[in-house]
Amino acid sequence: MVSFLCEISGISRSGYYNYFSSESQERREKREKEDLIIKENILKAFNFKRRKKGARQIKMTLEGQFQITYNLKRIRRVMKKYKIVCPIRRANPYKKMLKATQEHTVLPNLLNREFKQGIPGKVLLTDITYLYYGNGQKAYLSTIKDSSTNEILAYNVSSRMTLDLATDTLVKLMKNKQVMFTEGAFIHSDQGVHYTSPTFQKHVRKLGLGQSMSRRGNCWDNAPQESFFGHFKDEAYIKTCNTLDELKREIKKYMTYYNNFRYQWNLKKMTPVQYRNHLLHAA
């Protein structure tokens, strides 16, 4: 009977008996105990700061916060084994904004997708996204991001998509004492009506910044900013907020987490603030 079962299963008799040997069972039990320890450590990182994470984020958080090192293959294997599922970003189609009037000015693309220039305060990215929360309520989030460090330098939340959503973000940028612009610094955006507005462009000039715009309808020209919004919507607890004040508090918590505790693979496994300091010290 054993020979017949081995034949139809495609395994050898020696392999069958080896599987049920005491040594083999001991190895499996030992590995199971090790996996359970790894699972608990992964869950500590997975739930760190109440923000769910993928395998690479878990690896960096384990190393940065708990001084525990596992390779990615092991982390992914244990996550799959115990069904620890990370959030999967949904595609976010490029949103078309209102058509600019004749008095609005579209500016050339100075960035040309050269996002990582290794200089904090040189290239700033800005955009606006919508947020659904509570019982079908809608708000808008405007952010300014340092392209080299991924740090969110300023943000603004509003229930209305008016011009001051963008201009107030510039005011908050000006008040951020951690921001130091380098020579030739500029802010890059899409061709939305907020950014082609003479009022917004005047605010940019007052800050001493240049201004750059993506090609029309080309989301890849501002890809890192779009990427941030995707991660933010996956990781922040937006839908559970019932009021605009609750939403603002959650966004504030997330921005603190993102800048100071969210390790990023392409930042040499550092957080945005750590990487900013790294670049400044290396200069």
Image: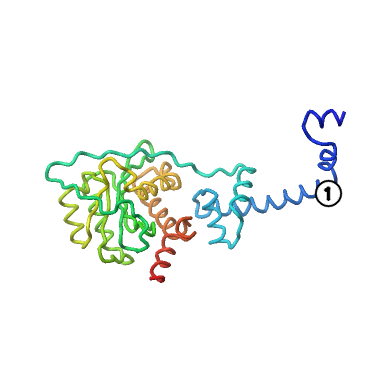
* Residue at 25 percent of width and 49 percent of height: 213
Circle 1: residue type: Glu
Which residue extends farthest left?
103
Q: Is residue 196 above or below residue 279?
A: above
Measured as percent of width and height from the top left, residue 41 is found at: 62, 54
* Residue at 27 percent of width and 59 percent of height: 172
Measured as percent of width and height from the top left, residue 222 is found at: 32, 48
Neighbor class of circle 1 (other Cα within 10 Å; few <14, some 14-19, many 20+) is few
Q: Is residue 39 above or below residue 259?
A: above
Residue 240 placement, left or right of 112: right
Measured as percent of width and height from the top left, residue 119 is found at: 35, 64
In this figure, which residue is indicated by the disc labeled 1? 23
**In the depicted view, which residue is nearer to us: 88 or 256?**
88
Q: Is residue 5 above or below residue 20?
A: above
Measured as percent of width and height from the top left, residue 104 is found at: 15, 46
**In the depicted view, which residue is nearer to us: 93 or 40?**
93
Residue 108 placement, left or right of 40: left
> How are the colours assigned in the image?
rainbow
What is the number of callouts on the image? Answer: 1
> Disc 1 on helix, strand or loop?
helix
Residue 161 placement, left or right of 281: left
Q: Quadrant of residue 192?
A: top left
* Residue at 43 percent of width and 55 percent of height: 258
Give the quarter of the figure containing the N terminus: top right
Residue 230 placement, left or right of 29: left
**In the depicted view, which residue is nearer to us: 84 or 105?**
105
